[in-house]
Image (cartoon, rainbow, N blue to C red):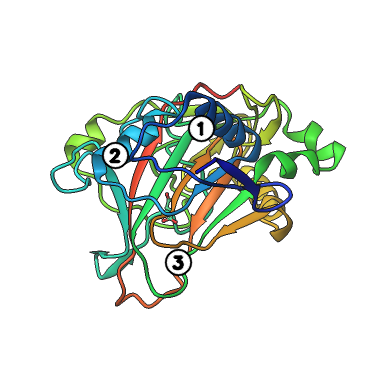
Amino acid sequence: MALTITPLTAHTGIEATGLDFAQPIDPADQTVLRRAFVEHHVLVVRDQHFAPDQFTAAAQLFGEIQPHDKKERHVPGHPGVDYVSNDQIENGRRIIPGETFHTDHSNHPSPPKATMLFAVELPSRGGDTQYVNMHDAYDDLPADTKQRIDGLKAVHVYQSKYSPRPLSQISDDSRRKLPPPGIHPLVRTHPENGRKALFLNPVRMESIIGMEDNAALALIEELMRHATQKKYEYRHKWRHGDWVLWDNRSVMHQANPDYDMKERRYLYRLMLKGETPV
Ligand code: SIN
């Protein structure tokens, strides 16, 4: 079957059909997919049938695997493959990984360029993932706001004292292996598509260098309110067999806990190494 590419919105998301990642992918198709990923930011491939090792092999078509900070959470028997699920309860509270808008592992000096999920078990309804386009959000900012944030840098730690949600516990061993905080510009330039993008993550942003915390929090809230408008969104409604790859340099994302928690939502997850944001 021939590879077909269909945009999912005018600004974000593309669906590829005619692919079976369990088979070798034609080099020309690989080039088309890599280009589509960089230009459309979210790449959706339907009807895949991955075992964990095949999921890893598909990821490696797009880059080098970036290990997750939490070494203790992985698919049983596959220490290199992480997962997200809705069945973790800590201190009487259910943990939904990725429940508010964020970009992944921005506490790293070189955060992952991309993340991917593969839907293994899904609730009968809900549990969508929302993506917002941070290039368009940046482009639409008023000129005086662009000027105000130009050159500002934020300190990203594992979990900010201002995080809107708790993260699940991390073992002492994983915590010891955390990198030093990432110090990143609020506006970064995508190294492959050349576009500027807002780079925000309220879960991890501890401070903005040279600003009082109250002023920094107000600025982050203003930028988040702007960036999370529906006009910047692609909302992915999961189907069994969906494989979704997104560009953390171009989008923020969030998981929706809007389904019956008696149903399981379980997806394999991997990230790809990225560059230092500039
Ligand atoms: C995440 O990677 O933040 C989780 C997204 C999701 O489960 O939809």
User: Which amino acid, mark 3?
Assistant: Gly
Label 3 CA crowd tier, 10 Å (few <14, some 14–19, many 20+) = some
Some atom of ligand 1 lies within 8 Å of the CB belonging to the residue at label 1? no
Q: Is residue 68 visible?
A: no
- Secondary structure of the residue carrying numbered label 1: strand
Q: Nearer the viewer, residue 11 or 256?
A: 11
Q: Is residue 263 above or below residue 100?
A: below
Callout count? 3
Q: Is residue 148 above or below residue 201?
A: above
* Circle nearer the viewer, 2 or 1: 2
Q: In the rendered structure, which amino acid carries the disc numbered 1? A: Val
- Give the number of the disc on residue 127: 3
86 vs 6, left or right, is: left
Instruction: Quickly name the residue at label 2.
Output: 54
- Left/right of residue 161 with respect to residue 253 in the rendered view: left
**Residue at position x 30%, y 31% from top?**
178
- Compare residues 236 and 108 and report the one nearer the observer: 236
In three-dimensional space, the C-alpha distance between marks 2 and 1, rounded to whole angstroms, equals 36 Å
Report the residue marked by disc 1: 155
